Amino acid sequence: MNKSTKVIRKPIINFTINTIMTVCMSAIIGTGFLIKYTLIPGQERWDVYGRKVELYLLGLDRHQWGMIHLILGFVLLGLLIAHIVLHWKIIVNVYKKIIKEPFTKKIVALFFAILCLLMILFPFFVQPKIESINKGNGRQVTLVTNLQYQYN
């Protein structure tokens, strides 16, 4: 492949990846809202509908939509990695211009790498608190649901 073809192809690849990332992010936001506000969990269904009901959209329940949400997150992660690889030279050059001191560059890069690694690996090293649910008590109120009901 000659250089002119390569120069033309890179912007097309970047545009395609960025477009798919935008669609993917929009779908992640949409499925998150769908799970949170439309396909509500058990106790909230009882409060809204006055009886035990199952909610479906396009034949999928909230847990199946949650799996789609997760898969979209993995797709976005793959696209983000491709985006970073394609823009690596730009990232390095901007980083060099922003932080001049070599030691500071290393410290900031190390801190950033450790922070990202900790955030990615955190779920694999924690254990949830396990509590038995007494019959009829259902799920316990959390900070988020408590705030939601306070302001509604």
Image (spheres, helix red, strand yellow):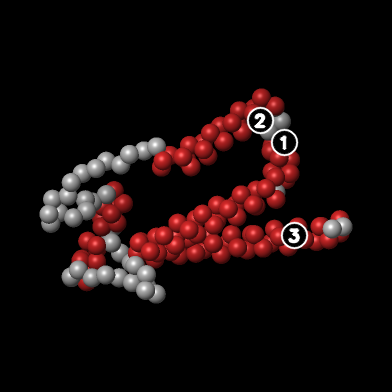
Q: Secondary structure at mark 1?
A: helix
Q: Residue at x 44, y 62 (%)?
A: 68
Q: Residue at x 45, y 65 (%)?
A: 30
Q: CA distance from mark 1 to mark 3?
A: 24 Å
Front label number (1 vs 3): 3
**Residues marked 3 and 2 touching at CB (< 8 Å):** no
* Residue bearing the label numbered 1: 96
Number of residues whose C-alpha sits closer than 10 Å to that of mark 3, classed few (under 14), some (14–19) or many (20 or more): few
Number of residues whose C-alpha sits closer than 10 Å to that of mark 1, classed few (under 14), some (14–19) or many (20 or more): few
Percent across and percent down for residue 92 are 71, 40
Percent across and percent down for residue 23 are 56, 64
Q: CA distance from mark 3 to mark 2?
A: 29 Å
Q: Is residue 100 above or below residue 12?
A: above
Q: Residue at x 77, y 61 (%)?
A: 9
> On the picture, is 60 further left or further right than 44?
right
* Residue bearing the label numbered 2: 105
